Every structure is written in C-alpha cells, then in structure tokens.
Image (spheres, helix red, strand yellow):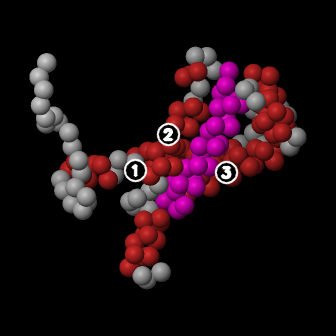
Amino acid sequence: MTHGRRADTYTPRPDGAGGPRDTAARYALLPLRIFLGVTFVYAGLDKLTDSAFLKDSGAGSIGDMMRAVRDSSAIPALVDMALESPVGFGYAIAFGELAVGIGTLIGLLTRIAALGGALISLSLWLTVSWAAEPYYYGNDLPYLMAWTPLILAGAPLLSVDAALRARRRRGTF
C-alpha cells in the first residue's frame, strides 16, 4: 500500500472555461433531460390518443387497469381515489405527463417539472409497479430516481430557465 496524493482526481474550473472534461461536465444532464422529456411527452400523447385507455372499463382502459392493481398496490387508498373517476384520473396523468415532458424538454421551470415527473413516477410505482418482483423489474422506480438529478440541478444549459437567468443577470428582464 502506498500513501501520497491521488493523481486521478478532477475539479472543473470555476470560471466554466476548460477542455472537453469541463464541457462534458456542463452538459452531463442534457441526455437525461432529453430522454425523460421525450418519454413523458410520448406517454402523455399515447394516453390521449388511445381510445381504449380513457374509458371507465374495457380492455386496455384506465379503469380496468386500476381495478387490477388495487389489491397488490402499496397504497390501495390511492387507487380507490383514482377509481372514483378513472377517466378524470387518466386525463390528469396524461396532461401531467405532457406538462412535465414539455417543461423538461424546453427547460421551463425545470425543477418543478422534474418534481412533477418524480411524483407521477412515485404514484405509479406505489400503485401499478408495486407488485413487480423482484422490485427492479418495475420500471417506475428507475424513472423516479432519474428525476432526482434534475430536481437538484435543474437545467443550467440550453433551457428557457438559463435564458431567463442570463437576462436577469444582465438586467434586461
């Protein structure tokens, strides 16, 4: 065992200038933001355009899906609440996914959009995906974790949030 200074550590320059490592660090969240944004926009549009989904009952309906997962969910009361108006709940989820996806893609109120995405993912994990065994087969838990960096960091680059922040700094807003 040797003792001494580590030569493999890296600290980005505080002024934002630098080489490829600094650039990669600044843009690290962009692929995640694009993936989550596109996925949530697609999910919302898919629900809104699926004639079977936004029905109280029938094959592929939100109502039948919620009734099927009710007894295996972590919080059956949450499912019961959704079952009071399954079609309304389906529209709320679809429009929520659209708002979260668009906000994430364009970087508008990104932290709030990411929090919304995390809450949607959490509610789906506790209801629809809860019975998946082993737990990592359920896809909503990874989505919940994927939203966390965007909640913490927002969209510092290539976003409406960054443009507004820059305008406020210049005093032109």
Residue 147, image x, y percentages: 52, 43
User: What residue did someone put label 1 on?
Assistant: 30
Q: Which mark is residue 117?
A: none
User: Which mark sits nearer the N-terminus, 3 or 2?
Assistant: 3
Which is more foreground, mark 1 or mark 2?
2
Numbered-mark total: 3
Q: Amino acid at mark 3?
A: Gly
Res. 42 visible in picture? no
Which label sits in the foreground, 3 or 2?
2
Q: CA distance from mark 3 to mark 2?
A: 17 Å
For the point 19% across and 56% down, which residue is it?
A: 18
State how far apart marks 3 and 1 are (Cα). 21 Å
The residue at which mark 2 appears reads as 146
Q: Residues within 10 Å of mark 1 (few under 14, many from 20)?
A: some
Residue that badge 3 annotates: 96
Residue type pointed to by label 2? Ala
